[in-house]
Amino acid sequence: MHPLTDLSDLAELVDALPSGAVVTEPDAMEKYRFDWSRDQTAGHPLAVVRVEDAAQVQTAVRWAAEHRVPVVPRGAGSGLSGGSTAVEGGLVLSLERMRAIEIDVDCRVAVVEPGALNAEVKAAAAEHGLWYPPDPSSYEICSVGGNVATNAGGLCCVKYGVTTDYVLGLDVVLADGTLVTLGGKRIKDVAGLSLLKLFVGSEGTLGIVTRALLRLVPAQEARSTLVAAFGDVGAAARAVVATGRRIRPSMMELMDQAAVNAVEDHRPMGLDRTAGALLVAQSDAPAAARAVEVETMRAACEAAGATEVFVTDDPDEGELFVAARRAAFPAIEARGALLLEDVGVPVPQLPALLAAIETIAAEHGVEIPVVAHAGDGNTHPIIVYDAGDADSERRARAAFDDVMRAAIALGGTITGEHGVGRAKKAALPDQLGPEVMALTRRVKDALDPLGILNPGAIL
Ligand SMILES: Cc1cc2nc3c(=O)[nH]c(=O)nc-3n(C[C@H](O)[C@H](O)[C@H](O)COP(=O)(O)OP(=O)(O)OC[C@H]3O[C@@H](n4cnc5c(N)ncnc54)[C@H](O)[C@@H]3O)c2cc1C
């Protein structure tokens, strides 16, 4: 990569794009340097380019390829792994202005520009009695482009799957500026290699998504919500495993005591501060089956030692508990600097993973509140440390690495939904091994031979 030395080259790009598209004032660029993880290694970009259509993306990428300038695609910047952290001397390619959404009711497909927020797609689908299920906790502040690029999960994936399960087609600008259309409004399509899915979860390292065709389903049925309190996280995890053997709830979230108390400190919601862990679960099965599912969950919780089980069919009351779970990240963020984990394991290993996290917290003398999309084995241990204390930070980083090792040892993954980004790339070879890392490198080199797309992410 050759750092740009001649700023007159940038004038070519400024001239080729509409007025105001290329931003170079340092103050205006500051907020584009970081995602939610506030990666302190973020560089200072040469420019932020705020594109309005795919042709402008092509123009910017062709310019970058010619001048060997790194390009970091950026959605809404809510990522938690440093995936859209700015690279020194590079372009930040912001898709935030590309927001159009069209609903094709007959095909049950949303045609979406990448900057549209997840919540905006849900709202547009709901106007037609349809539903776009993927629901990251951040659904009100994250973009579809970012969701596709990270293969985002969320609260209902335990039953409804993750982003990739809804991606029928993508338009992608490749590293040389070529625009390709992959897939389409077809429920079935096996023509050629499965290139469409190669781009889902590629974190901006293989191409830039400029349009997505997303599968919609009929609006979700009414939901019943179950909230169970346990003396410790192990008991809650055993209830999750037992439930998973019998049924698929439409949500099964876990908060440990530290997470519950962080939420109560931040925004009191009446949660039981004394509980060692809370499970918030839902069923959206049709009426009679819903009652059976709720009773199945209740029985699993009681058998695992729940101290209290509460059930409501009132959607507003249920939503209050879900909102408390969604509030956990911002609440824990108020306690100090954070290292956010996203490790996942096969569901039966969940009790062992949670036990390992407790041991790691004690060994390193750090606080690790845990929230989890427990029903799919995906946990978010959140390591809290004092940013002004070098020893506290050192212990937090050691705990961060040990949590990933523990997950791998249990047959799990270092990231279930946030992506590798920059925060986790050092641990990726430990999970994938040398052959898969070499294959990954060959794919990257084939699609981006100059290495200009999001350099430093994943690899
Ligand atoms: C409070 C909170 C809760 C969260 N909860 C969840 C959760 O439940 N589940 C979950 O999965 N995530 C969650 N996240 C993480 C985050 O919201 C997701 O990773 C989301 O998908 C990122 O979208 P974004 O638009 O903000 O992307 P960004 O942060 O801007 O970018 C993320 C990655 O996508 C790439 N990218 C963005 N747009 C494009 C594009 N058009 N083409 C190619 N690459 C692109 C970037 O280069 C980067 O690598 C949460 C975050 C927060 C702050």
Image: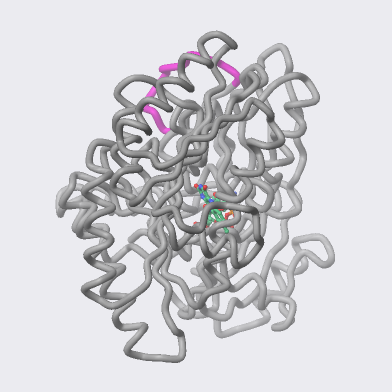
- At which x and y percent is residue 147? 55, 45
The quarter of the rendered structure image containing the C terminus is bottom left
Residue 269: image quadrant is bottom right
Q: Is residue 186 found inside the magenta-colored segment of the image?
A: yes
The answer to whether 316 is drawn above or below residue 2 in the figure is above
* Residue drawn at point x = 51 percent, y = 68 percent: 37
The answer to whether 73 is drawn above or below residue 174 in the figure is below
The quarter of the rendered structure image containing the N terminus is bottom left
Q: Camera-side residue: 194 or 403? A: 403
Q: Which residues are magenta?
A: 185-195
* Residue drawn at point x = 44 percent, y = 32 percent: 158
The answer to whether 391 is drawn above or below residue 280 in the figure is below
- At which x and y percent is residue 379? 38, 50
Relative horizontal placement of residue 81, taking residue 429 as reference (left or right): right
Relative horizontal placement of residue 438, taking residue 218 as reference (left or right): left
- At which x and y percent is residue 118? 66, 42
Q: Residue furthest top?
A: 288
* Residue drawn at point x = 70 percent, y = 53 percent: 56
Asked whether residue 200 appears in the rendered view, the answer is no
The answer to whether 456 is drawn above or below residue 442 in the figure is below
